[in-house]
Amino acid sequence: MSVREAVSARGLAVRARHRRNPYRYLLDDARLADLLLDLGLRRAESIWRNHNDPDAARGPYPRDSMGFVLLDPTAQPWETHEEAVLAAITVGAEGHAYLANAAAKAAGHRRLGRNYGEAVLVDPHLCGTDAFRYGHSADVRGVIAGASSQSPDQDLVEAGLLAADFVDAITEHHRAWEATTGKGRWLNATDTPGPEAAAMVAFFDGN
């Protein structure tokens, strides 16, 4: 779980930490941490700009801090929400205070299979005790993201942008890996079945 920290060009502190790395065939932990920090710095620029612009397209952001949680799109459905967390990112001095909010949105989305904000606003019977009372959450091509500290709509925009940037970055690394690796069947260095696929058919040759 590598940690990266930096200060944006506008002076906002950014901290990124990942809990798991499903892309080891592309990126070791250090490189994934660097990627996440870069994505956090992009969000920092957007947050600073929209916080300081009275004419921001979706209204000025009330805060210059945010918390983000990204879920692992490769996580198995039986894994807990805690286990499915890929990474968390904070922006600004107060970003850490909003991480639990972002996590709740992302977990709600994963459980329901749709924007958690819909449940909060329309279907409260889907929430229950200890649920977070605000939305929204984003799902960009299978990557679920929660963000918090601004208005619900502003949070949704930033969550969607983070997820989209992550998808684009992983795709770019994957295409580069394909170009250098050439033909093959498996996403690993040995081009052999992974443990899960091998275990599924191990019975066939057993006694």
Image: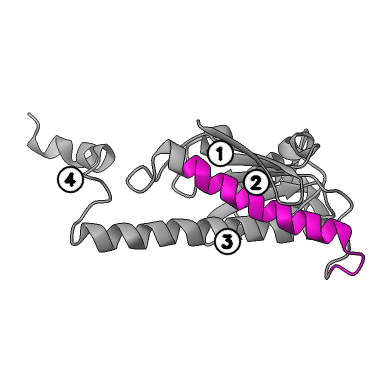
Q: Quadrant of residue 200?
A: top left
* Mark with earlier residue (1, 2): 1
| Amino acid carrying mark 2 in the image | Ala
Q: Which residue is mark 2?
A: 106
Label 4: few (<14), some or many (≥20) within 10 Å? few
Q: Which residue is mark 4?
A: 192
Circles 2 and 4: CB distance less than 8 Å? no
Q: Secondary structure at mark 3?
A: helix
- Camera-nearest residue between 98 and 39: 39
* Left-right relation of 181 to 86: left
Tell me the number on the disc at residue 85.
Answer: 1
Q: Which residues are magenta?
A: 32-56
| Amino acid carrying mark 3 in the image | Ala
In this rendering, which labeled residue sits more in front, label 2 or label 3?
3
In what quadrant of the picture does the C terminus appear? top left
Circles 1 and 2: CB distance less than 8 Å? yes
